[in-house]
Image (spheres, helix red, strand yellow):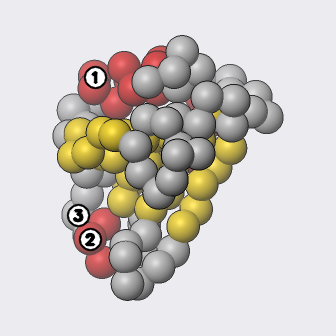
Amino acid sequence: MCSHLKPLEEYLITQGANEIYRGQVWSKNCREWIYYDVVLDPKSLKERFHFGETITIHNYKDIKVGSELGLVCDICKDAIMGIHPDSPASNKKQIIH
């Protein structure tokens, strides 16, 4: 995980977030993406960690392949993703702000 998102990764670990996948996804334009079995509040997390414009919110909705919501480092192409809150899989999942 890049140095820009590393503080968020460490925070999620302290919050008990369960990592469910780590690796390269989608394309070679993505480096390391980590998925957690929680719902992330990316706007709140951007503020908490004082992330600048190079960390962007990724909001992907798709009923066929799954939905995700999280933060992407546009410099390093790394990301931290959670379950999309509109997904049925988000039911009763921990929400991390």
Residue 32 is situated, as x and y percent measured from the top left of the image, at: 43, 35
Q: Secondary structure at mark 1?
A: helix
Q: Nearer the viewer, mark 2 or mark 3?
A: 2
Task: Work out whether mark 1 precedes mark 2 in sequence or the reverse, and give the earlier one.
Answer: 1
The three-letter code of the residue at mark 3 reads Lys
**Residue type at numbered disc 1:** Thr
Looking at the image, is 50 positioned above or below residue 68?
Answer: above
Q: Label 2: state its secondary structure.
A: helix
Q: Position of residue 49 (x, y in %)?
A: 60, 24
Residue annotated with mark 1: 14
Q: Are marks 3 and 1 in contact (CB under 8 Å)?
A: no
Real-space Cα separation, disc 3 to disc 1, in angstroms: 19 Å
In the image: residue 26, left or right of residue 46: left
Task: Characterize the local packing of mark 1: few (<14), some (14-19) or many (20 or more) Cα atoms within 10 angstroms.
Answer: few
- Amino acid type at circle 2 is Ala
- Closer to the camera in the image, 22 or 24: 24
Residue 95 visible:
no
Residue found 36% across the figure and 59% down from its top? 83
Does the residue at mark 1 contact the one at mark 2 (Cβ under 8 Å)? Answer: no
Q: Could you tell which of marks 3 and 1 lies nearer the N-terminus?
A: 1
Q: Are marks 2 and 3 in contact (CB under 8 Å)?
A: no
Residue found 49% across the figure and 36% down from its top: 31
Residue on which disc 2 sits: 89
The answer to whether residue 65 is seen in the rendering is yes
Cα–Cα span, label 2 and label 3: 8 Å
Q: Residues within 10 Å of mark 3 (few under 14, many from 20)?
A: few
* Residue occupied by mark 3: 92
